[in-house]
Image: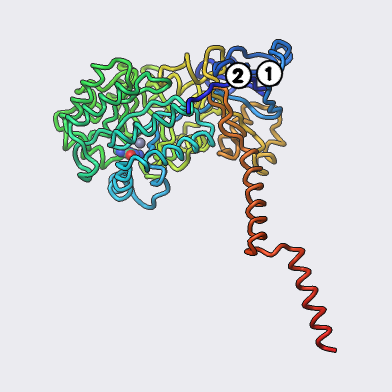
């Protein structure tokens, strides 16, 4: 069924970033309207301003979704996530290379089955919506069908993705490998079928240097040269053992980044996941080529990979462009709020800290900038898609209790959301002006379902209703009393 973009309006506390905040208290980096209105026409934002100014201009009868105490932000963007790892998340006790072999390379084989891929694409996109994520950069499995299933489902929901089929032609189970030629052919076919179709875009996706021969990286470079505008995503410098193996496999390369560089894989549409253990030369080269380093804090902690060095990467002498991502299933949460909260702790361990303004900017406008898509997503401004998240800063008793003492301070409220918030704090999610997740309606539905099931159980005799049970008890007591006389 084709997706119908919404024509509607949302009222609440609006927050959108205009540029990267320079530090705490940088009020010029964002626009905040305490009682704002976003007007949406056919899926795009057409007006933003004070509710008192805009409400009288709305067409008669236009619905307004009012969230009086909530914050309305641009939907979150996840710049690195693995769609075939929704059932790998929370796998115990391994570091990168063992984790790949023991869990990931087993699970991803199931995506040869198109029905399985379609089912899990639906779960995946539901889960993004529940967490307020409205766009994502996604790794498929090696099977082109997995990416077809994902794009098909995303397009039917009006969700814009950047995604690609993993290329891997060595150091993995045979069932999970392609060849340099088939990876080129299949990627090319997917680019033709999906890149620029609706809201979908393609990313050439060599998994990482260990699982690609030089011939395959050459094929990846050719795909990028032949299709300007497609993205490139891979992993870089995540784990020390990985780095040692890359050096053994590519002895001619100066360092890990240079492996990719030699095949023309660097550039302003190239996203490198992790980037934890980079040398000064590598960071300078990333800056020179405008390549993006993607910070994946929950994954880096969970797989025990190391601590991202934001200050080194953002060295003003040669700043590297940054993204923020969950990296599910190495990552442990679909929530960008949780991801930012863990990112803060990682940077604390580096002695660096991370202002809430900077974190929220990166989850929204900053990640859109990392993709070169700020004209489409990441801001609440006319012309952008109405991909929005509505956040409830009092979502749990602990959040409401803490909020009692910081009422009115926006930065403290954002910090509270990233420290204590998760999917429970996502009150609603909108894709192109259509509400695709409504937390409280889901809760109401769940309660109604429980009541319905209870009634069904009573009707079929599986459950005895309380009053009847008490009547039976009373009757049996009366009988016992009568019997005793
Ligand atoms: N390096 C190569 N593949 C992967 C992956 O699936 N997850 C993570 N975290 N690192 C990788
Ligand atoms: Zn990854």
**Could one spot residue 259 in this view of the protein?**
no
> N-terminal of the two: label 1 or label 2?
2
- The residue lying toward the viewer, choosing from 440 and 8, is 8
Density class for disc 2 (Cα within 10 Å; few <14, some 14-19, many ≥20) is: some
Marks 2 and 1: in contact by CB < 8 Å?
A: yes
* Disc 2, SS: loop
Q: Label 1: which residue?
A: 62
Residue 173, percent across and down? 22, 45
Where the C terminus falls, by quadrant?
Answer: bottom right
Please, which colouring scheme is shown?
A: rainbow
Quadrant in the rendering for residue 226: top left
Q: Is residue 130 visible?
A: yes
Image coords of residue 214 (percent x, y): 16, 30
Horizontal side of residue 398 vs 340, given as left or right: right
Q: Looking at the image, which residue sits at the far bottom?
A: 485
Residue at 62% x, 64% y: name it: 462
Write down the residue under mark 2: 7
Question: For residue 265, what is the image quadrant?
Answer: top left
Side of 301 relative to 435 (left or right)? left
Tell me the distance, in whole angstroms, between the alpha carbons under discs 1 and 2: 8 Å
């Amino acid at each position: 069924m084709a997706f119908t973009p919404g024509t509607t309006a949302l009222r609440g506390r609006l927050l959108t970033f205009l540029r990267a905040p320079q530090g705490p208290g940088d009020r010029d980096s964002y626009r905040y309207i305490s009682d704002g209105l976003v007007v949406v026409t056919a899926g795009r934002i057409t007006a933003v301003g004070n509710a008192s100014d805009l409400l009288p201009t709305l067409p008669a009868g236009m619905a307004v979704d009012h969230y009086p105490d909530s914050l309305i932000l641009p939907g979150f963007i996840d710049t690195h996530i693995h769609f075939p790892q929704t059932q790998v998340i929370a796998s115990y006790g391994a570091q990168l290379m063992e984790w790949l072999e023991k869990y990931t390379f087993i699970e991803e084989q199931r995506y040869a089955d198109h029905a399985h891929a379609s089912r899990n694409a639906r779960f995946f996109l539901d889960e993004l919506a529940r967490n307020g994520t409205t766009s994502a950069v996604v790794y498929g499995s090696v099977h082109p069908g997995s990416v077809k299933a994902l794009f098909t489902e995303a397009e039917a929901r009006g969700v814009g993705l950047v995604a690609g089929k993993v290329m891997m032609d060595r150091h993995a189970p045979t069932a999970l490998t392609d060849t340099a030629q088939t990876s080129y052919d299949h990627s090319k076919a997917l680019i033709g079928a999906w890149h620029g179709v609706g809201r979908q875009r393609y990313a050439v996706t060599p998994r990482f240097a260990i699982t690609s021969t030089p011939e395959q990286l050459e094929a990846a470079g050719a795909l990028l040269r032949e299709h300007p505008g497609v993205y490139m995503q891979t992993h870089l410098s995540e784990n020390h053992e990985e780095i040692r193996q890359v050096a053994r496999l590519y002895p001619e390369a100066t360092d890990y980044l240079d492996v990719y560089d030699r095949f023309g894989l660097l550039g302003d549409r190239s996203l490198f996941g992790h980037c934890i253990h980079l040398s000064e030369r590598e960071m300078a080269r990333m800056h020179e080529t405008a390549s993006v380093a993607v910070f994946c804090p929950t994954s880096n902690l969970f797989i025990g990979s190391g601590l991202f060095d934001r200050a080194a990467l953002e060295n003003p002498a040669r700043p590297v462009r940054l993204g923020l991502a969950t990296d599910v299933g190495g990552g442990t949460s679909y929530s960008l709020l949780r991801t930012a909260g863990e990112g803060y702790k990682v940077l604390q361990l580096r002695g660096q800290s991370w202002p809430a303004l900077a974190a929220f900017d990166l989850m929204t406008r900053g990640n859109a900038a990392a993709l070169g898509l700020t004209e489409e997503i990441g801001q609440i401004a006319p012309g952008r898609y109405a991909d929005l998240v509505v956040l409830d800063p009092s979502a749990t008793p602990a959040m409401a209790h803490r909020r009692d003492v910081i009422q009115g301070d926006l930065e403290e409220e954002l910090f509270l959301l990233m420290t204590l918030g998760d999917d429970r704090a996502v009150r609603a999610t909108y894709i192109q002006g259509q509400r695709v997740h409504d937390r409280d309606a889901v809760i109401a539905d769940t309660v109604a379902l429980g009541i319905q099931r209870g009634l069904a159980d009573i009707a079929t005799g599986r459950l005895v209703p309380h009053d009847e049970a008490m009547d039976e008890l009373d009757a049996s007591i009366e009988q016992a009393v009568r019997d005793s006389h």
